[in-house]
Amino acid sequence: MTVIDEQAAVLALAQATHDKPWHHTTRVIAAAGSALGVLGGAFAGRDEDDQAHAAAIAARVRAEDLDWARDLIAAMLAAGVRLVTVLDRDYPGNLYSAYDRQPFLWVRGATEPGDHRAVAVVGEHDLDHAAAAARALARAGLTVVSPLRTDLDAAVHEAALAAGGRVLGVLAGGLAASSASGAHASVAKRIAERGAVVSPFWPDVDPTERTVALARVVTCGLADCLYVVDGHRGGSSHGHAAKALATGKSVLVSQRLQQEQPWVAQEGGRGGMTVVQDIDDLSRRAVNLVDMTPRLNVS
């Protein structure tokens, strides 16, 4: 069987997942070491819940589902987008270590081994601060990760690119959906030239509240740590910080945010959150955190 056959099986199993989040399917595929193996019944030895889940999704997959998946992979590749699954050697190691990793990513552009030295930058209002942070992190030799939904997100990517850095942009929709990058399509194009635009969704999916929440898994997962510029309780920044902390990632926050927003102290009450004094302090702490992070070999 070819790599394409395995990738098609991953897509078919994800499509057959109806009653649980996709990361349950990721887990059984990764544990088996083969999506085709799961289809063939190779899911013994897991706990009972995983065995039942594997059996259920495998039973739903038909031959035509695999044909559909192969055709989709070929069509996306022709459009300049490649598929990376949890079984592939170039599935990002930072994301692989997350309990809720997604079974696949569509990638426009190129990821590199050095992208494991990555910091995610998120915020809601202060574009200048966000851009300064991205610029400093890029100059420090770190890959900058950020969503690509808002003007602030675009400012993060543009600042990192202008500083000569690498960037990874995470979409909250499919790579073939024009609404996913929206007004920032030109930024997405530049990101793909000097990094990668990634999506964990079917190519034609439009952004929704649900996909925005799921995209946080990838944004936080691709990075070693997260820097939060600003944000109110219950907002996008708060959601990213909570997700990062829940998956064991360190969170850095601006001093102003810590002073103005009570949710910062509440989220950081169990540890994992650090207040930085200024942009220079951010760069120093981010480099230290990245270089101390143990690496998971997924090959």
Image: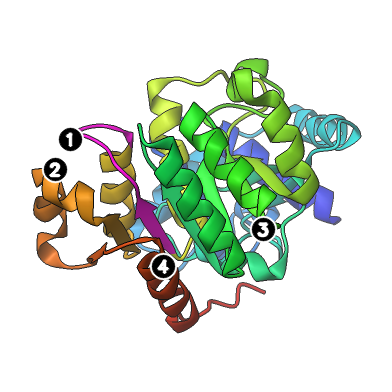
* Residue mark closest to the camera, 4 vs 3: 4
Mark 1 or mark 4, earlier in chain: 1
Decide which of 142, 214 is in the foreground and name it: 142
SS under mark 1: loop
Q: Where is residue 260 in the image (x, y as percent from the top left)?
A: 13, 43
Amino acid found under the numbered disc labelled 3: Gly
Residue 239 against residue 235 in the figure, above or below: below
SS under mark 2: loop
**Where does the magenta region start and end?**
225-236
**Disc number for residue 280:** 4
Mark 2 or mark 4, earlier in chain: 2
Alpha-carbon span between mark 2 and mark 1: 7 Å
Amino acid found under the numbered disc labelled 4: Asp
Residue tagged by mark 2? 261
Residue tagged by mark 3? 165
Q: Is residue 50 magenta?
A: no
Amino acid found under the numbered disc labelled 2: Gln
Q: 10 Å neighbourhood of mark 1: few (<14), some, or many (≥20)? A: few
